[in-house]
């Protein structure tokens, strides 16, 4: 952007903060499932995938691994980029990934999350019929979740 003051005309480069959001999946006993969590600041019953900001000197893939471990104590591998979405918080770019869990037991960081669970496709298809709902349909979180439910997401 360029300053509109004719005496200045200085160029400015607005800051963009990178953030990642990740669909963590696993296969146990022949069933696929994904990790969803509820944050305290979410409306009641809303569950979504995990997300976090990229630290200085950290790759996007390293951020996925770190954030999943920090928030849920789950170890992941096979981190793959899927898509991105502008995210106004306040000037961020949200980059979506998938990652395969190599551990199972969820221990949520209570400073970040209220709870977290593994859900199968069948369970997620029932969301909205009870107390639990998914993220908004126009969010990258929901797009990743819906693509996984519909088995169109390559994981």
Image: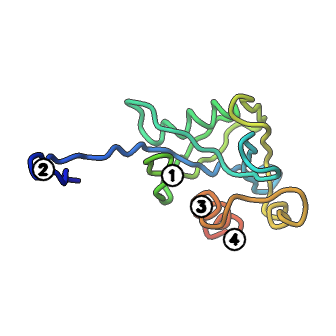
Drawn side of residue 62 relative to residue 8, left or right? right
Q: Which residue is mark 1?
A: 80
Where 23 falls versus 110 (above or below)? below
What kind of colouring is applied to the model shown? rainbow
Q: Which residue is mark 3?
A: 139
Mark earlier in primary sequence (1, 2) = 2
Q: Quadrant of residue 40?
A: top right
Numbered badge on residue 9: 2
Discs 1/3, front: 3
Mark earlier in primary sequence (2, 4) = 2
Q: Image point 45% across, 42% down: which residue?
A: 60
Discs 1/2, front: 2
Drawn side of residue 145 relative to residue 19, left or right? right
Q: Which residue is mark 4?
A: 150
Drawn side of residue 21 relative to residue 113, left or right? left
Q: In this view of the protein, which residue sits in the foreground, 112 or 149?
A: 112
> Residue 98: image x %, image y %?
58, 52
């Amino acid at each position: 952007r360029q300053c509109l003051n004719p005496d200045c005309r200085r160029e400015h480069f607005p800051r963009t903060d990178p953030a990642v959001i990740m669909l963590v999946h696993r296969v146990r006993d022949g069933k696929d499932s994904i990790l969803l969590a509820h944050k305290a600041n979410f409306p009641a019953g809303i569950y979504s995938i995990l997300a976090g900001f990229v630290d200085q000197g950290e790759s996007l893939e390293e951020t996925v691994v770190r954030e999943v471990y920090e928030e849920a104590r789950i170890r992941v591998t096979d981190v793959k980029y899927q898509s991105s979405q502008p995210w106004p918080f306040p000037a961020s770019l949200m980059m979506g990934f998938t990652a395969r869990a190599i551990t199972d037991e969820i221990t949520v960081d209570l400073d970040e999350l209220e709870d977290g669970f593994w859900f199968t496709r069948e369970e997620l298809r029932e969301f909205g019929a009870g107390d639990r709902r998914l993220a908004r349909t126009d969010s990258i979180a929901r797009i990743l979740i819906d693509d996984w439910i519909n088995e169109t997401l390559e994981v």
